[in-house]
Image (cartoon, helix red, strand yellow):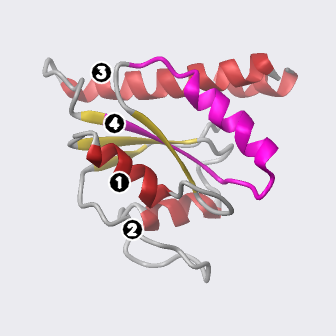
Amino acid sequence: MKKTLHMIAIYIAITFLCITTSYAQGTSVVGTTGVLVITHGSPESSWNRYVRWAVDDVKVPFPVELGYLEATSPDINDAVNALVSKGVKKIVAVPLFISSFSGHMEEIKYILRLKENKPSDEDLKRIDATIPISLKRGIDDHPFAVKIIVD
C-alpha cells in the first residue's frame, strides 16, 4: 500500500509539473499557482486517510490542497478557498479518478465552473471563487496505472 501511495504522489507531481512547465513559458508560476487534488471521498475515514497521506507526500514548490467530491470534508469549494487564501492566482486541478470519462468528472467540471449545465441530480455546490482553473484528465492509460494495480 505504501508503494501505491508513493506512486500516486509521484503521479500528482508529474501531472502538475508537466502542465505548469508547458504553459509557464519562462514566467515564474511559483507563488501564483496552486494544486487542487480532487478525489471522490468516503464516509470511511480509513480510506480518506490513505488519500491524505498520498497528497501529503507530494513534493512540489506550490501550495497543494485536497478536495473531496462528496462524503467528507474538505469539499472542493473549501480546498479552492484555501488555495485562494494562500494567494494563488490560478489553479491546476488534478483528479484522482481512473477514467476521464466518468460521470464524476462532469460533476467536477460543473463544480469548478468549467461547465454550465448541471450533469446530475446530485446536490452539487459550485465554487465561490472566480479564479482560472485548469482541470487535468484522470489517470486513464498513464503508465503508473498498471504499477498501482500490480501493487
Classify 20 as above or below 106.
Answer: above
Q: Quadrant of the N terminus?
A: top right
Foreground disc of the pair 4, 2: 4
CA gap between label 3 and label 4 equals 13 Å
CA gap between label 4 and label 2 equals 21 Å
Classify 109 as above or below 36.
Answer: below
CA gap between label 4 and label 1 equals 11 Å
| Figure quadrant of residue 110 | bottom left
Dot 3 or dot 2, earlier in sequence: 3
> How many marks can you see?
4
Mark 3, residue position? 21
Residue 77 vs residue 141: left or right?
A: left
Mark 4, residue position? 34
Dot 4 or dot 2, earlier in sequence: 4
Classify 40 as above or below 128.
Answer: above
Mark 1, residue position? 81
Q: Quadrant of the C terminus?
A: top right
Query: Residue placed at 28% from the left, 39% from the top?
Result: 86
Query: Residue placed at 64% from the left, 45% from the top?
Result: 97
Mark 2, residue position? 115
Q: Which residues are magenta?
A: 34-60
Q: Amino acid at mark 3?
A: Thr
Dot 3 or dot 4, earlier in sequence: 3
